[in-house]
Image (spheres, rainbow, N blue to C red):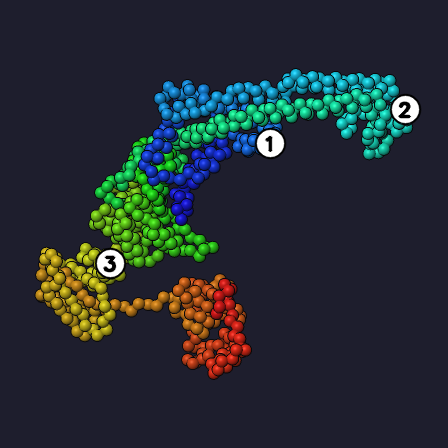
Amino acid sequence: MIQKMLKTLEFDKILERLQEHGVSENVRVKISALKPSLSEAEVKQKLVETTEGRTIIEHSGTPPLSPMTELNKVLSLVGKDSLLMPDQLEAVAQFLTSCRRLKSYLKKAEVTNTAVALYGNSLYDLTSLEDEIKRVIRGSQVDDRATPALADIRRKIINGGMQIKAKLDSLLRNNSQWFSESFVSIRNGRHTLPVKKEFKARVTGTVIDMSQSGGTCFIEPTSAAKLQDEISMLQIEQENEVRRILYILTAQVEEKLTFIRLNIEAMETLDFIFAKARLSIAMKASVPAVTTERKIRIKTGRHPLLKTECIVPLDFHMDETARGMVITGPNTGGKTVALKTIGLLSLMAQSGLHVPAEEALLTLNNYALCDIGDGQSISENLSTFSSHMTNIIEILKVADDQSLVLLDELGSGTDPAEGMGLAIAILEELLRKNCLFIVTSHYPEIKTFAQQTKGLMNARMAFDKQTLLPLYRLEIGEAGESCALHIASRLGLPEHLVQRAHQAAYEENQAYGSRQAVGSHVSQTSQSIVNEFSAPQDKAVVMENPINRNDGNYRFLCVNDNLAGNESLTEKQCVGQNAASAVQSAWTDQTMKAPNNRIKADLPKKPAEAPRCMRFNVGDSVMVYPQRDIGIVYRKANEKGEVGVQVQKKKLIVNHKRLKLQVPASELYPDDYDFSIIFDSVANRKARRVLGKRHDPNLVIELDTNERGEPI
């Protein structure tokens, strides 16, 4: 889950960018495994290294690091009776050259008074080994002058070859009519002459090869054979001498192996530091301050993955007095980018990376937990709401007082009233866990909740109502608005439709306030329901913890707002009236019309409606989508909302959302109908009847299974 949330915040893309600045493959692998740290000392040390690395690059230029391609593989052969080949020795020499140059580079960088520059002292000087390899190996081959013996052998081989060529050239010139070509040919490592078949007997020697047509014989003359044999012996001597030289060089590498490995370790450490420094330069970043105190301050912060010219800098702050912030504002206004920027900059700082901001103070978090994006998945059968709730449930299990929680569009994807209720409940739980959290939302009730709740604060994304353009500027301390009606009006929606939308959104919600838990007189009880009526003092009738009442009796309690802790002043019973009449009667009662009074009422509660999945009964005829197959329900829904349906004698488990009732069982079968006739085999039915009367060990009942292998 944590890895998934790091990816959601795009931390993996930051690591990919960091990898581009790494030189060696091992460092790129190390970067891919980089994780945020919770140790304040470790984070500060890594940030100092990044800062010093950037200082050195800006002062001394690009460091001469070595890619060390397959160097570890080459060194793994040393000490195992293996012989390093010339190209492998050249790789060692190239690394030693890089070490020498880097040591010199860091020596010059010591004027910057940085600790990283002193890392050059940890690089061992292996110039003697470097020079010896370069003297002996040239162009991935052992040089002729590696030893006097090798030089003498190769000189003799060259002279022998020249003698053979001179003899054969003489034969070609003097007897050109014998030969199909006028040059010496090398066949199977031997010097041969291309003799025409009819003149084969004229040339004394050994036939080495024939042409494909058979018209030419490639003959090694006897006079050249003796010289060729001498050359072959010299080549064996040459090979032995080369192997001896390579063994000596391999032994010298083995002698310095410990120091070479220490240099590799130092080179990789410096490569990692300079990669972070180069990323800092590329992002025009600055060193953030980190703290264990639960506060965040960002000045002109930028999302590092967005183009600089497209970014409106983010200014953000949360101090110790607040634990949570609710950001509101129009769609595409930058709320999600703000969330991701805060989360990503926190992860970068804890990983020892500079952040793209003028200034930043970031707290250390054990986890950066987020729910951003709709998370819809056809393959996993997840809706937007299901995805949000799945993530949030996991977040609430993990989050504690050291966590940073980022929730985008909290409570979205479902019924607005229920979504709002869930959002408030989740905010309360996050406050209880005392974690640091930032959420975005469109619900006005959440804005009010944040304004009235200690530890919460509002913020909004600025919006230009004239140009209809979001300003992407975060304004802390004020709640925003979605501006949907204003945007629709500016885009050309007819005014009468805008007015009707405003009436439905605001005026009717007030007239039928019983549908929502809002209003100035709602108690802290989350189940409160408010009914607005035209009444003296414009007070509300509040129903708290309603109970089912079917006898037409309603009980009202009049509470005075000025009397702290007063439960009731007047009680009125209304018998045999409907709810509306009972409320009007309560308001017209002179005893309840005193100023500052409000009324509590027990009103009838509408019976809860059964979940949709439970409306399918055994025997119902249903249509299965998307195939539009007709089937019969053989098993009611389980706890997952999955219904058992038999389609063409095949039993399936189907999510209730894919079913549509065609004909209920009550219209198809009598009340006492035996459904085993449809769903069970004749043999099983007979066996069940027998076993219902007596035990018979020879009887077997075979159970069908669905497509999951579950017994039916």
Which numbered disc flags the more N-terminal residue, 2 or 1?
A: 1
Looking at the image, residue 201 sits to the left or right of residue 155; the answer is right
Query: Would you place residue 619 above or below residue 320 in this image?
Result: below
Q: Residue at x 83, y 17 (%)?
A: 170
Task: Give how far across and how far down residue 550 sits, in percent.
Answer: 23, 73
- Asked where in the image residue 238 lies, by quadrant, the reply is top right
Which type of secondary structure does the marked residue at label 3 adopt? loop
Using the rendered view, name the quadrant where residue 556 is placed.
bottom left
**Residue that badge 1 annotates:** 81
Q: Residue 360: image x %, image y %?
A: 31, 34
Residue wearing tag 2: 202
Neighbour tally class for label 2: few under 14, some 14-19, many 20 plus, Cα within 10 Å = few
Please identify, in this view, whether the residue under mark 2 or under mark 1 is nearer the observer.
1
Q: Is residue 374 above or below residue 536?
A: above
**In whole angstroms, how far apart are the C-alphas of marks 2 and 3?**
117 Å
Between 3 and 516, the residue placed more toward the observer is: 3
Which residue, given by chain and number where applicable, does mark 3 sit on? Answer: 526
Amino acid under disc 1 = Asp
Look at label 3 and name its amino acid.
Ser
The kind of residue on which mark 2 rests is Arg
x 54%, y 21%: residue: 129
Whole-angstrom CA distance, mark 1 to mark 3, is: 78 Å
Say how many tags the image has: 3
Mark nearest the camera among 1 and 3 is 1
Q: Secondary structure at mark 1?
A: loop
User: Residue visible at 19% across and 72% down?
Assistant: 553
Lower sequence index among marks 2 and 3: 2
